[in-house]
Structure formats: structure tokens, C-alpha cells
Image (tube, helix red, strand yellow):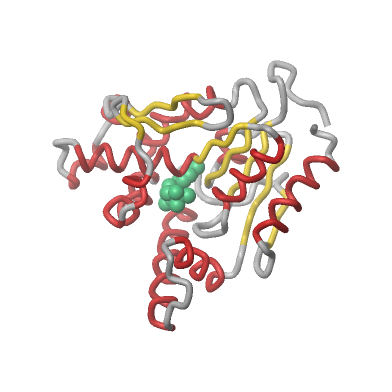
Amino acid sequence: MRTDSRREGPIITLDGPAGSGKSSTAKAVAKRLGFRHLDSGALYRAITLGLLRSSVEEADWGNLSEQGFTNLDINLETFENRFQVLLRGQAVDSELRTPEVTDRVSFVASLPASRQSILGLQRKAGEDGRLVTDGRDMGTAVFPHAELKIYLIADLEERAMRRLREVGEDSPDDFALAQQARALDTRDQSDSQRTISPLKKAEDAIELDTTGLAFEEQVQAIVDLAHQLTLL
Ligand code: DC
């Protein structure tokens, strides 16, 4: 497969539902290949955090123009092998994962003006290639010409369990597990039913079901696919 001649290397996209392990997998694949990793969900989370810190009433978020979102001043700082998300020039990380942000991010991501406001930023991150990026529409809308597109899926219960483990709950009870599964499912419904750039498998994406796969196995499966397609 040929790489876009303007780039120094391929783009690999990982899309899929919440909790399918996209970000951690994409990060590990990028490390193995010596590529950069871009977590596009972090950009939508930064927009949401920016809104929460702004004077705009939550009831008015849906009326903001693209310029209104651009004014929040979201940016990406480039390091050797990663991108750091900046909000008004400040690095943001753990602040992006709070329940206040998580509960609102799906709505914010459903707004066409918010999506448009970070499209250029995402494409710029991929202009030199050698990128592994994860999200919901990376293979369908942001990088439709990516050389390798993966659609990661996993059973809802397994995804809920992984999310809980991420926050240190290794043996959740049935109630906690069901509650987490419901929250993931609600977000997936919202992400896949919106009209603009919904969560869906790109026609040319390879579906990888990670239910029952150990983390290292899913990383290896994608690295193997990249080698099979002689992308490297
Ligand atoms: O992957 P995540 O949970 O950090 O994503 C946060 C939200 O952003 C999620 O509700 C879906 C949305 N999102 C999106 O709409 N498009 C992307 N490319 C990435 C994330």
C-alpha cells in the first residue's frame, strides 16, 4: 500500500465505542512503531472543560458558533512522540477525565460547530504522517485516506470492567458494573446517533474484537496488521 506522498509515513486510525481500549492501545502501538499518538477524545474533553471554565451558560453551549469554540483556545503542543493538549496555553490532563467533563462531552461533541473548530488542528497533527490516532470519526471524517483503519469493539460488560479497573476498582460489585455499563451505553448511543460524524465503522476499516484479548495481544494484532500491509 502506498503512503500519501506528502507525508513521511502512514496514518493509522483506531475508532470504536467508549471503553474499547482505543487510547491506551493507540498509545502503545505508536510507541512500538516510533510514531506519534493523538487522542482526539481529549480535544473534545478540552473543549468541554473550556466551556465549564467560561462564562457561557451551559444552556447556551448549543448556540455557540465555530468562532465561539475557537475562542476557547484549544491547541496541541508537539513533543517527540506525542501531542499535549493545551487549554489557554496550559497543559490539561487529569482535569479532562472528571465526571463533570465526562457527563457533558458527548453533547459537546455532537455540535457541528465544536467539531469544525478542531478539524484543522487534528489534520495538522497528521500532516507529516507517522501518526496513530484514536477517536470516533478518525477513519471516516478526519483522515478518510488513512493507510490503516481499525475499528475496535468489545462486549459492553468487558468495556465497563476495563473502565472501572482504570480508576482502581478491580473487583466491582454487580451494581457498580451495571451502572458503568449503562453510562457507556448511553454515551455510545449519543455518539452513534448524532447526525455529524457519528461513531461508525469506516467501510475500509478492519474490525478487531478485543473481548478476551489481553492488552498486549491487541497491541500486537495492530502492529502485525501494519506490517502485513507493508506500511512500515
Ligand atoms: O474517547 P473519549 O471517551 O475520551 O471521548 C470523549 C467524547 O468525545 C465521546 O463522547 C465521543 C467524543 N469523540 C468524538 O465525538 N469524536 C472523536 N473523534 C473522539 C471523541
Q: Quadrant of residue 35?
A: top right
Locate the N terminus by quadrant.
top right
Q: Quadrant of residue 86?
A: top left
**How far from the left and from the top, in percent, is residue 177?**
44, 76
Q: Is residue 41 left or right of residue 70?
A: right
Locate the C terminus by quadrant.
top right
Mark yes or no: residue 194 visible. Answer: no
Look at 33% across and 38% down and name the residue there: 47
Q: Quadrant of residue 48?
A: top left
Q: 175 above or below 196? A: below
Front residue of 197 and 45: 45
Look at 19% across and 42% down and name the residue there: 60
**How far from the left and from the top, in percent, is residue 229?**
83, 39
Q: 187 above or below 223? A: below
Mark yes or no: residue 118 visible. Answer: yes
**How far from the left and from the top, in percent, is residue 176?**
39, 77
Look at 39% across and 66% down and name the residue there: 183
Q: Residue furthest top?
A: 6
Q: Is residue 181 left or right of residue 159?
A: left
Front residue of 90 and 226: 90
Look at 82% across and 40% down and name the residue there: 227
Q: Residue furthest bottom?
A: 174
Q: Is residue 224 left or right of residue 98?
A: right
**How far from the left and from the top, in percent, is residue 140?**
60, 40
Q: 99 above or below 78? A: below
Front residue of 133 and 71: 133
Count of numbered tags: 0
